Image (spheres, rainbow, N blue to C red):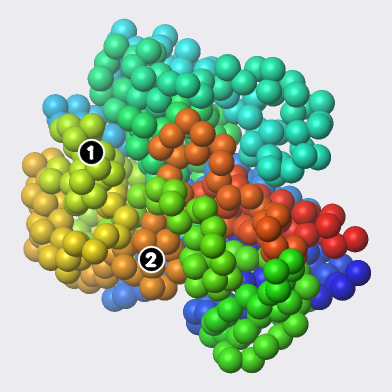
Amino acid sequence: MNKRVAVIGGGLGGLSGAIYLARLGYQVDLYEQNQQVGGKMGEWQSSGFRFDTGPSLLTMPFVIEDLFESSSVDLRDTVLPFIPIEPVCRYFFPDSSILDTFVDREKMRNAVNAFSPQSAEQIDQFLNYSKRIYDITHDLFVTHPVHEFSTLFKIKTWTSLLRFWQIDPFRTVHQSTKRFFDDDRLVQLFDRYATYNGSNPFQAPATLNIIPYVEFGLGSYYVKGGMIKLIHALEKRAKYLGVNIHLNRRVERIEHNDESVQGLSVNNTFIPYSNILCNADVVDTFTRLVKKKHKYDKLEPSLSGLVFLWGIDRSFPQLAHHNIFFSDDYEQEFRQLFNTKTAPLDPTVYVSITCKSDPSHAPEGNENWFVLVNMPYLTKDQDWSQIAVQTKKTILSKLEKYGLAIKNHIVTEKQISPPDYQTHYGSNKGSIYGISSNTPSMAFRRPANRYKGLKGLYFAGGSAHPGGGIPLTLLSGKMAAELLHKYSI
């Protein structure tokens, strides 16, 4: 067995895969085209402010702990101090009402009861339903490569399949949330979770209602010092295990014959490998690196996003770490995002202010705002310079209606748009989450971790099974590494 393996891309999936492969005894060469590893999970610093450029919420911390299982340290207290986030999020609705959500079930119930008295019992019913979906799907879809026959023949798999109807695959997210809640504001709140994997709640299957349980039932955390600390810890762990990380090394092609991979072309140099774990976007990989016909380019990409990083020279105590300002017509917003593929006229605005949990991220009395609005994936007719200017005006106007007049308080700014996701991270059409789950089948048909059409090619990352988000991306690296090991013996 050839124990030398290549990893393309140093995002979460690539780092995870590299660590698991190194633990299995492989000599791992990781190639990253940028100046640092981490992919979308980076940071930006300016004028005393620091910002996460990607996720600012951590769930399922046990997935990270598994990566460090041979360490003798307690990750939660030392290497990666996890800060519990309470409230998890503060929601601002068009009717000027506000709701805080909590991991603590009693606090959650009390908050909902004060917000919408008839909904207190409904919130318990919904979260129990969400937990049931998690319990059924966790072993089959979340932690194992569902595309493999070996998975399908496990007893736990058949137990899950026999309860398949209980994961609510035939209704949409919206249809199911409407069944539980009489208050349309709570329907909108829980519809939002479909966007966690870049999908449309009015089309995506209700199975995605697993996500609220992951957030509320398993805990919501932030990493002290910034999410970049997770990347630094993974990079340090990979190097400790002997992974060779090559920065500024762009892979130009995966060399192969009709049956199997042969190696990589990196900076115009051929390097032989019989096994490759690819952390690049699956669609981009086939189009640009493999140059082989594939079915994935016909699948609908996920949402993209427009991000503004704003250093604000004052503080707003009425805001929490995570804040959502909802649009007045949520269904219209998603019609614009997915049907006409245009920037929403009234976007839902997400504002993350990490200095609320870690004051070192902004000068005293100031705040660091990460502002995100969902955007369509790239098409030929979009002018992103114009869209960014107009969207900024829309966001500032919307926030001002909530008493947040920040226009004259922005002292530093950076923008990340869909073309940036395509250029810097190779995301297909600028999508953030790979392929959308906007049909009942697509939630279960993300590209497999092992490509059976070309021996030796494996995939990890948000565009592959089991999907996007920190824990799922890390799990994809584990699955890809274990499959590579299994089929290399």
Does 123 sit above or below residue 385? Answer: above
Answer few, some or many: residues within 10 Å of disc 1's Cα (few below 14, many 20 plus, some between 14 and 19): some
Q: Name the quarter where the N terminus is drawn.
A: bottom right
Q: Which of pointers 2 and 1 lies earlier in the amino acid sequence?
A: 1
Residue 319 pos. (x, y %): 27, 44
Quarter holding residue 390: bottom left
The foreground one among 370 and 445 is: 445
Residue 244 pos. (x, y %): 71, 80
Circle 1 residue? 335
What residue do we see at 37% from left, 61% from top? 429
What residue do we see at 68% from left, 40% from top? 146
User: Considering the numbered disc 2 on the image, is that residue within a helix, a strand or a loop?
Assistant: helix
The foreground one among 153 and 195 is: 153
Mark identifier at residue 421: 2
**Disc 2 and disc 1: Cα gap in Å?**
22 Å
Tell me the kind of residue under disc 1. Answer: Arg
Q: Looking at this view, name the residue that lies furthest to the front.
A: 258
User: Considering the numbered disc 1 on the image, is that residue within a helix, a strand or a loop?
Assistant: helix
